[in-house]
Image (cartoon, grey):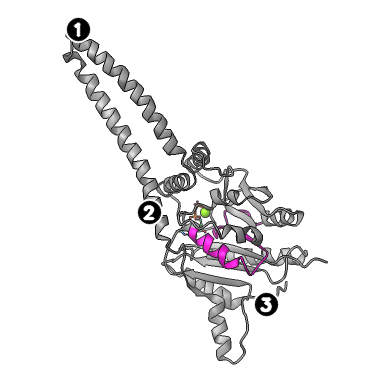
């Protein structure tokens, strides 16, 4: 029989001291359940990525790691945002497991969809996207803005799977290739489809957060959409060029109109329209410059080639150190097996 795949569940956590103690046992239970039915290896892990939290999140993760060897954690040296936290976790997992599932730590995404995700992997799919079927528990505002987000992304040429956030299964084969995508401005939802490989989707219902508050207010959602578009697509630049051509034609017509008006001797009457046009064009030019500036800014950041994440601590290194001190070196990250 083919050995069962080792699964690492990758969970970004930022200031989640309220919700982590509630959801951590659920993740472990899911891991045990999947191992019990023989879908995954008993050497699977739950990996928490502490994204520079200012509260007790890292202490909680360290305690969890002490309690049960299946809980492990890494700590980013500072807060770098959700996307970089997930990336750090995936890159950390890549060479130590066969499959990863990334999921938020707030219990909003239904962990039972993992069964189906692993099934799809066993059928031969290398990427499985979790897609939200309903958003009934989200407020009307969150739902409308979030759905608008996916539509805007696609309209602007950044291909994303509709209603798919960062709940997905990725095999380590795909992650090996993904590691070659070295950009600093990362938007995982749009980048993963670019790697290719056979993919499938699994639908699930999104529920309310179990505790704590969302870190994605409207401001951050707009920033994420903007970052996604400008990181993945140059369509806005093409649009600007199109606008430019259109308004130049319009401008030529206006010039003819103005000249004719001047010849006929009624120039003063045109004052208001001139001001309007100046304002309008001024606005459009500023927006256009702004968008182009965004791309230049991104190019600047990419040329710096700064690291995308920095891990300052790992729970298993801590325990390894302890073990070595006690005279029994070992690898806490890989040796524990699951018992129900
Ligand atoms: N998160 C993170 N770094 C941040 C912001 C958020 O790692 O700077 C994590 C957070 O702990 C959670 C996930 O990203 O696990 C999604 O955040 P949240 O639930 O606040 O967003 P929402 O589900 O409301 O869009
Ligand atoms: Mg959430």
Image: magenta residue range: 84-111
Callout 2–callout 1 Cβ contact below 8 Å:
no
Q: CA distance from mark 2 to mark 1?
A: 53 Å
Compared to residue 70, the image places residue 277 above or below, namely above
The residue at the point 21 percent across, 20 percent down is 272
Find out whether residue 90 is within the magenta segment. Answer: yes
Give the residue number, with chain letter if any, for mark 1. Answer: 264
Observer-nearest residue: 217 or 21?
A: 217
Tell me the number on the disc at residue 300: 2
Q: Residue at x 53, y 45 (%)?
A: 138
Which part of the image, by quadrant, shows the N terminus? bottom right
Marks 1, 3: nearer the viewer: 1
In the image, the residue with mark 1 has its CB under 8 Å from the nearest atom of ligand 1: no
Within 10 angstroms of label 1, few (less than 14), some, or many (20 or more) residues? few
Q: Which mark is residue 336?
A: 3
Local crowd at mark 3 within 10 Å, few (<14), some, or many (≥20)?
some
Percent from the top left, x then y, of residue 185? 45, 54
């Amino acid at each position: 029989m083919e050995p069962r795949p080792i699964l690492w569940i990758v969970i970004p956590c930022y200031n989640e001291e309220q919700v982590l103690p509630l959801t951590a046992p659920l993740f472990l239970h899911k891991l045990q359940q999947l191992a019990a039915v023989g879908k995954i290896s008993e050497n699977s892990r739950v990996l928490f990525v502490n994204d520079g939290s200012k509260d007790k999140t890292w202490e909680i993760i360290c305690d969890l790691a002490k309690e049960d060897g299946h809980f492990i954690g890494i700590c980013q040296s500072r807060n770098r945002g959700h996307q970089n936290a997930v990336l750090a976790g995936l890159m950390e997992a890549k060479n130590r497991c066969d499959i990863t599932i990334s999921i938020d730590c707030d219990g909003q995404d239904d962990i039972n969809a993992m069964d189906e995700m692993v099934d799809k992997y066993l059928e031969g799919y290398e990427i499985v996207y979790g897609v939200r079927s309903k958003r009934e528990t989200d407020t009307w505002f969150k739902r409308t803005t979030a759905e608008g987000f996916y539509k805007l992304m696609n309209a602007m040429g950044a291909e994303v799977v509709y209603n798919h956030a960062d709940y997905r299964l990725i095999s380590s084969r795909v992650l090996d290739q993904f590691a070659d995508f070295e950009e600093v401005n990362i938007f995982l939802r749009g980048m993963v489809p670019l790697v290719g490989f056979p993919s499938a989707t699994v639908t699930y219902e999104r529920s309310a957060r179990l505790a704590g508050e969302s870190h994605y207010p409207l401001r951050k959602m707009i920033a994420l959409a903007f970052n996604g578009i400008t990181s993945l697509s140059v369509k806005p630049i093409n649009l600007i060029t199109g606008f430019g051509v259109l308004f130049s034609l319009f401008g030529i017509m206006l010039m003819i109109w103005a000249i004719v008006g001047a010849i006929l001797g009624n120039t003063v009457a045109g004052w208001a329209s001139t001001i309007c046009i100046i304002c309008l064009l001024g606005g459009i030019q500023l927006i256009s410059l702004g968008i182009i500036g965004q791309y230049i800014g991104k190019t600047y950041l990419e040329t710096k080639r700064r690291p995308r994440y920095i891990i300052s601590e790992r729970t298993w290194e801590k325990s390894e150190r302890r073990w070595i001190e006690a005279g029994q070196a070992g690898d806490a990250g890989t040796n524990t097996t699951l018992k129900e």
